[in-house]
Image (tube, rainbow, N blue to C red):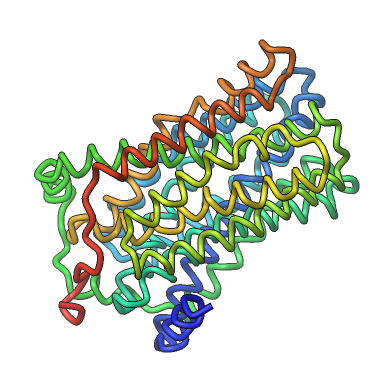
Amino acid sequence: MALITTAWQEIRRLEPSQKSAVVASFLGWMLDAFDFFIMILILDNVAADFHTTVKAVAYGVTLTLAMRPVGAFIFGFLADRYGRRPVLMLDVLLFSALELASGFAPDLETLLLLRLLFGIAMGGEWGIGSSLAMESIPASARGIVSGLLQEGYAVGFLVATIVYWALFAAVGWRGMFIVGAIPAFLVLFIRAKVPESPAWAASDRHSIKDMVSSIVRNWKMFLYIVILMSCFNAFSHGTQDLYKVFLAKQLKFDTAGISLLLIVANIGAIAGGLSFGALSEQIGRRRAILLSSLLAVLVVPLWAYSTSPAMLGLGVFLMQFMVQGAWGVVPVHLNELSPPEVRGTFPGFTYQLGNFVISLAAPLQAGLAESHGNNYALALASTAAVVALAVAAAVFFGPERKGVAMHDRQT
């Protein structure tokens, strides 16, 4: 309780302009995730409509993940060159338009192309939003704000689940994509309320040559973070992307039952991200990640092999509490590790390269399950245990720069 009280006091002490930056960054990632998870929730419905397999449609997830590094680099460079605020607005408009277009795809091939383009836009948001927030707030607030920002992802999944529960029967999978155009309205809030990052405003405008040179000079850190984020992305996507299919195809849950369990999972994710983000201010970034990832291993049997709704509910709550608990530390950890002159590019680009490395996770998991008689529990459990240990190992041997100054006023 004391931890939460202290964290809440840090949030309350933020200036209005700092709060606006945090809100915009949170909403940007939340709405980006909302659009991404719409695709996750309708994989089997799209497969049925286009008369193909879940594995074939899951390549839409692969293409989105694979193209996110491209977007992270393009939009990150633009943000380092022209500012966080205008580029964030452009990015939000782009991913909203592509989500809307996905609802009108006439065939699977067109849908896959649109998800590829959506991946470029999605890849740009996280790095810009996290750098805008972390550069705008005092160092003492970074841990709790990191957990808050990252759990925009879980809130986006939660909102997508609620929309799926409430509207899918009426609007179908195409209508779900059309609803996904709503994030475009966030641009109005950013334009009216969000100031530019003070760190960017005080920095020199680097050319792309300067930015590439900075990444080359820091190649060891760059390579380490890509490895770390590959493990992290396998951790989240390996425990989320096919869980709805597992509930529907293997356990035969209906839409209401699936939605309820996914809502419980995302409540656990939000609680975990906020808790471990705040805890990282007390025990350090690495220790917080290490603790949550190791605890996740212990939850795997309950999460994947329970059969009653009550035990499954407990399992999904605890699993996502630990998975997103580890993830809640990521925004602040990556921004603290990044070279300041490329903070708009470096965190997002390394994060999304990790997504590229594991972009085949969904079809591979689906293929493993289908090759074992649609045993999704086996595919999910084996993935979760391995990648949780991989996250723990990667962070155990890695560095930490907790509290590093991000601009002159924090020095």
Determine the residue positioned at 63% across, 46% down: 99
Q: How many marks?
A: 0
In the current view of this chain or complex, which residue is farthest to the front?
298
- Image quadrant where residue 90 sits: bottom left
Q: Is residue 241 above or below residue 145?
A: above
Q: Please indicate, yes or no, whether residue 70 appears anywhere in the rendered image.
A: no
Determine the residue positioned at 45% across, 45% down: 293
The image position of residue 218, as x and y in percent, is: 13, 45
Could you say which is closer to the camera, residue 375 or residue 64? 375
Could you say which is closer to the camera, residue 312 or residue 89? 312
**Is residue 298 toward the left or the right of residue 231 in the image?**
right
- Image quadrant where residue 272 sits: bottom right
**Is residue 266 toward the left or the right of residue 117 in the image?**
right
Q: Please indicate, yes or no, whether residue 91 appears anywhere in the rendered image.
A: yes
Q: Is residue 143 above or below residue 291?
A: below
Quarter of the image with the C terminus in it: bottom left
The image position of residue 40, as x and y in percent, is: 66, 38
Q: Is residue 81 above or below residue 17?
A: above
**Is residue 379 toward the left or the right of residue 236 in the image?**
right
Could you say which is closer to the camera, residue 16 or residue 206? 16
In the current view of this chain or complex, which residue is farthest to the top?
371
Determine the residue positioned at 84% across, 46% down: 168
Q: Is residue 232 above or below residue 386?
A: below
Quarter of the image with the N terminus in it: bottom right
Determine the residue positioned at 38% across, 49% down: 290
The image position of residue 58, as x and y in percent, is: 62, 27
